[in-house]
């Protein structure tokens, strides 16, 4: 299967990984909408919300809570939005949850600087 997220999970292509456990990894989005834009991705290939099982989904939400706390503390964001795309609006057909921080005052940091703060 030619899936970019499976390749990231298998370390075939690099990523700025900030979290990993038996079921999921989380890494910084390569084309972030805001500083700290993170993707939580199950290690098993599920296509979308219809495909993924509820147990894995609940685990992803646990990790979202943990990373929301870390991102908020380390990057001082004012808000954080969870997004999960399906169908025509889903670019990468491997289930993932976006964590998109927002800031009242725009901050300027490189992906590497953000990675060093969050890893
Ligand atoms: P979707 O529209 O599928 O919900 O969003 C896919 C996201 O994956 C996009 O925000 C895109 O920037 C990100 N993305 C695509 N390819 C890569 C990659 O190779 N590495 C990383 N870190 N993010 C990627
Ligand atoms: Zn995949």
Image (tube, rainbow, N blue to C red):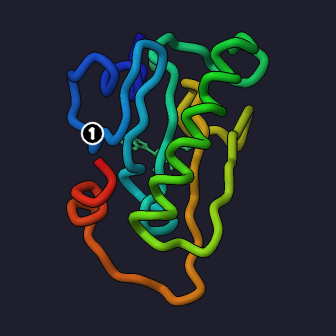
Q: Is mark 1 within 8 Å of ligand 1?
A: yes
Q: Quadrant of the N terminus?
A: top left
Q: Nearer the viewer, residue 76 or 81?
A: 76
Q: Name the quadrant containing residue 58.
A: top right
* Residue that carries the numbered disc 1 in the rendered image: 15
Which type of secondary structure does the marked residue at label 1 adopt?
A: loop
Residue at 41% of width from left, 28% of height from top?
25
Residue occupying the far bottom of the picture: 105
Q: Is residue 5 above or below residue 51?
A: below
Q: Is residue 117 above or below residue 86?
A: below
Picture coordinates of residue 44, whole percent (x, y): 49, 11
Q: Name the quadrant containing residue 81.
A: bottom right
| Mark 1 neighbour density, 10 Å: few (under 14) some (14–19) many (20 or more) | some
Residue at 69% of width from left, 47% of height from top?
83
Picture coordinates of residue 50, whole percent (x, y): 78, 17
Q: Name the quadrant containing residue 52.
A: top right
Picture coordinates of residue 9, whole percent (x, y): 34, 21
Taking the image as shown, residue 98 lies to the left or right of residue 4, namely right
Residue at 64% of width from left, 69% of height from top?
79
Taking the image as shown, residue 37 lies to the left or right of residue 47, namely left
Taking the image as shown, residue 111 lies to the left or right of residue 34, namely left
Picture coordinates of residue 28, whole percent (x, y): 38, 49
- Total marks shown come to 1
Q: Is residue 118 above or below residue 93?
A: below
Q: Nearer the viewer, residue 89 or 95?
A: 95
């Amino acid at each position: 299967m030619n899936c970019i997220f499976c390749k990231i999970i298998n370390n075939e292509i690099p990523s700025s990984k900030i979290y990993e456990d038996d079921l999921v990894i989380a890494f910084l989005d390569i084309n972030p909408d805001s500083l700290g834009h993170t993707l939580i991705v199950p290690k098993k290939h599920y296509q979308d919300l219809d495909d993924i099982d509820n147990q894995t989904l609940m685990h992803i939400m646990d990790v979202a809570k943990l990373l929301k706390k870390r991102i908020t503390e380390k990057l001082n964001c004012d808000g954080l939005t969870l997004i999960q795309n399906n169908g025509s609006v889903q670019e990468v057909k491997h289930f993932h949850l976006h964590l998109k921080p927002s800031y009242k005052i725009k901050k300027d940091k490189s992906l590497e600087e953000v990675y060093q703060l969050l890893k």
